[in-house]
Image (cartoon, grey):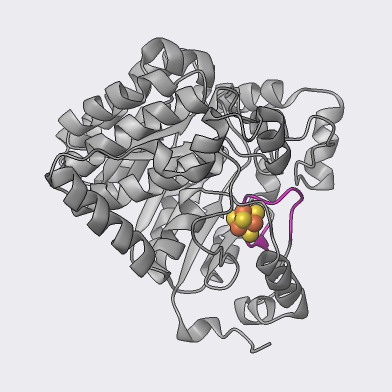
Amino acid sequence: MAKKNSSKKKLNGTIIVTYRCNARCSMCNRYKAPSKPEEEISIQTIRKLPKMYFTNITGGEPFIRTDLQDIVRELYKKSERIVISTNGFFTDRIVKLCKEFPEIGIRISIEGLEQTNNKIRGLQNGYQRGYQTLKKLRDMGMKDVGFGMTIQDKNASDLVPLYKISDSMGMEFATASLHNSFYFVETKNIIHDRPMVTKNIENLINELLSSHSPKKWFRAYFNHGLINYIYSQRRLLPCDMSFDTFFIDPYGDVMPCNGTENKEVMGNLNIQTWEELWNSTEAEDVRSKVRSCDRNCWMIGSVSPAMHKYIWKPFTWVFIHKLKNIVGIKYSMYENKVVCDYRDGKVTKEELDKCSTYDMQAVVNNGLSEASMEQLNNRTGEEIVDADIAQQLKK
Ligand code: SF4
């Protein structure tokens, strides 16, 4: 196989700056498995990253890191666009960072209207804090701000109302659904009432298609892919993670994505140069695994690059569905054969569950280092992170 020379091509990178998190989301157990601050990716390692056309900074909760502003400053030198995913809790830190980098993108995870959000995310006043942070950023003139929502049984009915709030504030509205992987420290995430959840997604798709924004029409396609994913079908687009896209974890391990069952490592940027790592046999091995990966994730991190690369497919879908929308024909989730098959009893819930990554028996691999695991011997992840934040706030 030909060697990948990253110096020729700008990449799409996701930097997991920490595994520490102060939220208690019901669909993600990462808060129980935090990284040790001393081990988290350093500025020196970040300097070794390649040029990127897009960088997503995520966690854990990235703003738990008090040096996040220094990290962004470094990444700004090598990336055309940066978006930070956050739970919006550390309002002052977010505002301070955005004052220095007004072009940056901020996505705040809000999992539904107030009551639903606070129940799912387990953050006291989480909705109000997230909402107020977004409002503040908007009032400051920040353009690239928005909501991120993980659609599930508990919040599906809030999907369109939340979209409408975000739309009325002129904000982006990013969606996802439940996934299982080492990154989420979870194997039991699954949508139980597929028709109900996807009906709400269908309504969102029709809202998006009715808008005048081409960006929203393509978001409609992404959501159409979510329906397909929720029904455990093959991805609508190939997955090319690790070819021109990468993730790096808090320990400097470079990975193809965050959707694998166990952590897949292409190399370690703390001890290797980018070129060595990217062109290594380990990286090639991971790429072969990606080629035969059957997990069929549908997360924006792996779908957005694919939508750009295989643009003709989403473009055709958008063209047809926008035309239909103009003449008053609405998108229907029954355009997906499997949705009809499920309605008609040709396929059962159990059969669909079996095709997904949901696994009641699997032992979760959390991808932590030995030192990070060791700290969990005497205290829980929640206790460690709560004490850590209390200490930070005292200072
Ligand atoms: S489908 Fe793609 S994003 Fe998902 S686990 Fe496989 S390689 Fe990673």
Percent x, y of residue 261: 74, 48
Q: Position of residue 4 (x, y in %)?
A: 59, 83
| Front in this rendered view, residue 355 or 345 | 345
Front in this rendered view, residue 116 or 307: 307
**Extreme-bottom residue of the structure:** 2
Q: Residue at x 74, y 59 (%)?
A: 264
Please tell me whether the stretch drawn in magenta is mainly helix, strand or loop.
loop
Toward which corner of the image does residue 232 lie, by quadrant? top right
Q: Residue at x 31, y 33 (%)?
A: 204
Residue at 79% of width from left, 37% of height from top? Answer: 364
Q: Whole-percent x and y of residue 387?
A: 64, 22
Work out which quarter of the rendered image holds the N terminus and state it: bottom right
Q: Is residue 281 visible?
A: yes
Report whether 353 appears left or right of 25: right
Residue 79 visible to the viewer: no
Q: Is residue 328 left or right of residue 30?
A: left
Q: Which corner quadrant of the figure contains ligand 1?
A: bottom right
**Was residue 260 drawn as part of the magenta stretch in this picture?**
yes
Start and end of the magenta stretch? 252-264
